[in-house]
Amino acid sequence: EIVLTQSPDTLSLSPGEGATLFCRASQPVGRNYLAWYQQKPGQAPKLLISGASSRVTGIPDRFDGRGSGTDFTLTISNLEPEDFAVYFCQQYDTSQVTFGQGTKLEIK
Amino acid sequence: EVQLLESGGGLVQPGGSLRLSCATSGFTFSTYAMAWVRQAPGKGLECVAWVSHTGSGTEYADSVKGRFTVSRDKSKNTVYLQMNSLRVEDTAVYYCAKSVSPAWVTSLDHWGQGTLLTVSS
């Protein structure tokens, strides 16, 4: 099983600032089979990025995914109030897909 | 519009059984793999089971292997999760989610609203 570790657990920032979220895998994620999700309280997760860097249709270009191998990042530039949420990474390179524990992006 | 609607959650005693259903619409059901993802209160996400587009391929998390069974009925555009020998630690919101790919679960582009399972005596 590939274990995904996200950091930091919580990130406190102000609207207008930029955020960088990290996701590290316990072994290489092949074919960059890594996705990022956003989850707001009381809602289901929402797919933002797949294939490590491909934004889903309708996701603003301030969301940028990068990385390969074991290290991946999600960068959110110019934070909007609606961006404050919990973010999860997910790998789907193996048949047992796994998620990171999440990073909470909160308003400072 | 893609829609996923879970049902069947509730309160069950430890050792009990329950079946969750996920009724789908708005896409060609037989073309995509489907997954069940759970989230314990205040916790992260765990993919507990998935089923391929044909139903012939399945995978389970180690935490539920041998207790849960995922299946799908193309005539009803519905995916199921049969849960047996339930434990307190199975308490969670269970989401049904649609994979982008057919043969196995990849990224999950549509999710239901979730159904709450509480296992308690």
Image (cartoon, grey):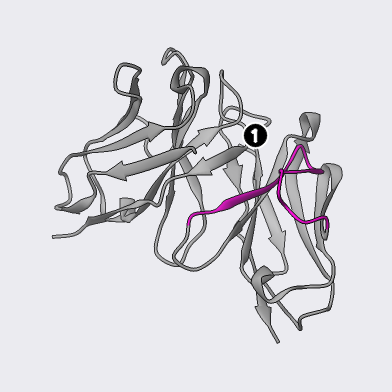
Q: Position of residue A24 (x, y in %)?
A: 76, 51
Front residue of B80 and B16: B80
In this rendering, would A13 be left or right of B97? right
Q: Can I make out residue B102 in this image?
A: yes
Answer few, some or many: residues within 10 Å of disc 1's Cα (few below 14, many 20 plus, some between 14 and 19): many
Could you tell me which residue is drawn at 49 percent across and 38 percent down? B1
Q: Residue furthest front?
A: B1
- Chain of the residue displaying label 1: A
Could you tell me which residue is drawn at 39 percent across and 64 percent down? B41
Vertical position of residue B58 compared to residue A27: above or below: above
In this rendering, would A19 be left or right of B121? right
Query: How many numbered marks are there?
Result: 1
Front residue of A26 and A75: A75
Callout 1: SS: loop
Disc 1 target residue = A92
Vertical position of residue A81 compared to residue B70: above or below: below
Could you tell me which residue is drawn at 17 percent across and 40 percent down? B17
Is residue B117 within the magenta segment? no
Question: Is the stretch drawn in magenta largely helix, strand or loop?
Answer: loop
Vertical position of residue B98 compared to residue B12: above or below: above
Q: Position of residue B82 (x, y in %)?
A: 26, 32
Q: Which residues are magenta?
A: A44-61
In this rendering, would A75 be left or right of A104? right
Q: Can I make out residue B63 in this image?
A: no
Quadrant position of the N terminus of chain A in the picture = top right
Vertical position of residue B119 compared to residue B6: above or below: below
Could you tell me which residue is drawn at 34 percent across and 23 percent down? B71
Front residue of B117 and A81: A81
Amino acid of disc 1: Tyr
Q: Position of residue A26 (x, y in %)?
A: 72, 44
Is residue A56 within the magenta segment? yes
